[in-house]
């Protein structure tokens, strides 16, 4: 009997390196059969800064996932943070002979023509993503093969990576004992993992808030139409707290996770923390004040995303119907509320969906990149599997204020509980009990429907 195909994603982040192993069953369902996460080493903002340490951490992550799955990893799809990539949208045209149907060769020619743009020789093309086709002025065509017309046009989103950082990544991965099967833009992977079927008919902004970077993808009717990378993330929030509260980084991280909120209105009004600083002195800070330190950094990140989208596409609330927030840093309480306020659009938390297997391990937002790499890899017969069938909304939507954007699908489950942090030097004087929540992705299985 033939073995099921195995696809492996290697998400090399600023705070963690994650290997995700997926198995594709004959009926198209994707089971995650292995996962290995280790703290990131030798990386800074998506680039290798220490080859040996990065190689070591990658090897650890791969081996960990191998042990869980019992599978030997040979090839991996590797994430690339957007700050080492450049994306442009280029127009391609192909003339069709009169009275002849459009063939795949015509489609390929239109894409090839769009690709023929002068690119900096220091750039290596990672993705060529055709958007919709136009036949004789008729827009919005997904697949023009078999149609009649004399003029075939296509917009192609071309993503190219800077050669140096890509070479360094490839070298580390190879020295860790595996082969790079392909590089994948982080924002594309995150979108593949989190978008729901209903959102593939809309324009949605997917924001993956990581440790060192925030990757942004604008998905227009299921296609990645624009991407950007903000060189700020959750680590900067932690650094702000460490600096202002004079706390060691690790303790500032624990305080943030356990008591932080992105908007002061959501901070516990009755909670005051007693902080022991690095020098041993103690002082009190309310949860309200804590969130007043946190908010400006997150507001800065959302402001930069807004500016970026405004410049490239126009005002976010006019070009998009919703925002999906994912990545580990999106777990901070109140992040969706702040985003809703800044984008004036409905916002929902995004988690990997459309998968089975080890869902309790990979269902958090920090795994969107890793799971998305597997889903991307499955579609690599030249097509991107954006039509992974996802029929169950799995998260709580934060609706826009009245009159803003379109409503999102009804919420079916409460948001997942915040990750529990270990004890910290800061002790709460009074703390309300934490609410219990449940895993939302369990039992949700993805079935492949029609490929794009
Ligand atoms: N419960 C939580 N509350 C608040 N922040 C959290 C929580 N859990 C994780 N984070 C933050 O998430 C960030 C890490 O997110 P993630 O694992 O997605 O990043 P990464 O993929 O390693 O980084 P990058 O994508 O920038 O390379 C850290 O800054 C961490 O503080
Ligand atoms: Mg990441």
Image: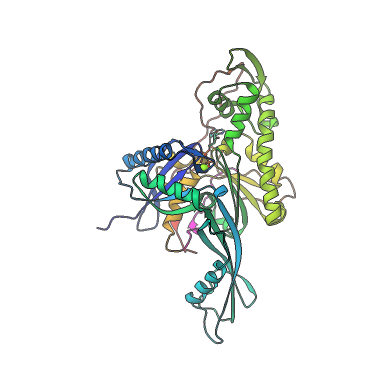
Residue 163 in the image: x percent, y percent? 50, 53
| Magenta stretch: helix, strand or loop mostly | loop
- Left or right of 434? Residue 406 is right
Judge whether residue 444 can be spotted in this image.
no
In this view of the protein, which residue sits in the foreground, 238 or 122? 122
The residue positioned 46% from the left and 61% from the top of the image is: 449
Q: Looking at the image, which is closer to me, 261 or 227?
A: 227
Let me know if residue 288 is in the magenta part. Answer: no
Tell whether 40 sits left or right of 150: left
Q: On the image, which quarter does residue 257 sit in?
A: top right
Q: Position of residue 436 (x, y in %)?
A: 53, 30
For this orientation, the residue located farthest to the left is 1
- Residue that extends furthest to the top in the rendered view of this protein: 281
Q: State whether residue 258 is above or below residue 347.
A: above
Q: Which residues are magenta?
A: 383-396
Screen quadrant of the N terminus: bottom left
Residue nearest the observer in this picture, 415 or 93: 93
Q: Examine the rendering and report whether any part of residue 398 can be seen.
A: yes
Q: Is residue 391 magenta?
A: yes
């Amino acid at each position: 009997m033939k073995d099921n195909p195995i696809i492996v994603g290697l998400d090399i982040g600023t705070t963690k390196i994650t290997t995700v192993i997926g198995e594709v069953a004959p009926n198209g369902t994707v089971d995650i059969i292995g996962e290995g996460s280790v703290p990131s080493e030798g990386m800074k903002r998506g680039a290798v800064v220490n080859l040996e340490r990065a190689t070591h951490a990658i090897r650890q992550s791969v081996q960990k996932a191998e042990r869980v799955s019992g599978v030997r990893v040979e090839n991996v799809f590797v994430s690339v943070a957007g700050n080492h990539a450049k994306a442009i949208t280029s127009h391609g045209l192909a003339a069709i002979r009169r009275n002849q149907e459009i063939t795949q060769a015509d489609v390929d020619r239109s894409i090839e023509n769009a690709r023929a743009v002068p690119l900096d020789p220091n750039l290596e093309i990672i993705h060529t993503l055709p958007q919709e086709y136009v036949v004789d002025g008729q827009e919005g065509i997904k697949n023009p093969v078999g149609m009649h017309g004399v003029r075939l046009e296509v917009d192609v989103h071309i993503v190219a990576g800077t050669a140096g950082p890509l070479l360094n990544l490839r070298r580390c991965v190879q020295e860790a004992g595996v082969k790079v099967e392909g590089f994948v833009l982080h924002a594309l992977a995150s979108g593949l993992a989190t978008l729901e079927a209903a959102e593939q008919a809309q324009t949605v902004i997917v924001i993956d808030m990581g440790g060192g970077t925030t990757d942004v993808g604008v998905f227009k009717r299921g296609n990645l139409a624009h991407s950007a990378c903000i060189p700020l993330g959750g680590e900067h929030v932690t650094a702000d707290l460490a600096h202002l509260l004079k706390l060691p980084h690790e303790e500032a991280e624990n305080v943030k996770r356990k008591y932080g909120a992105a908007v002061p209105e959501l901070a516990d009004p009755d909670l005051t923390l007693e902080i022991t600083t690095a020098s041993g002195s103690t002082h009190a800070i309310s949860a309200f004040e804590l969130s007043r330190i946190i908010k400006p950094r997150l507001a800065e990140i959302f402001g930069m995303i807004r500016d970026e989208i405004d410049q490239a596409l126009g005002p976010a609330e006019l070009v998009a119907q919703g925002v999906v927030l994912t990545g580990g840093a999106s777990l901070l309480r109140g992040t969706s509320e702040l985003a809703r306020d800044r984008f004036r659009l409905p916002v929902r938390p995004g988690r990997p969906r459309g998968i089975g297997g080890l869902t309790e391990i990979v269902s958090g937002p920090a795994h969107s990149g890793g799971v998305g790499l597997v889903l991307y890899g499955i579609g690599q017969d030249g097509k991107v599997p954006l039509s992974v069938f996802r029929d169950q909304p799995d998260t709580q939507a934060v609706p826009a204020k009245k009159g803003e954007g379109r409503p999102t699908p009804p919420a079916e489950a409460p948001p997942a509980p915040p990750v529990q942090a270990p004890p910290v030097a800061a002790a709460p004087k009074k703390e309300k009990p934490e609410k219990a929540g449940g895993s939302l992705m369990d039992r949700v299985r993805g079935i492949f429907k029609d490929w794009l």
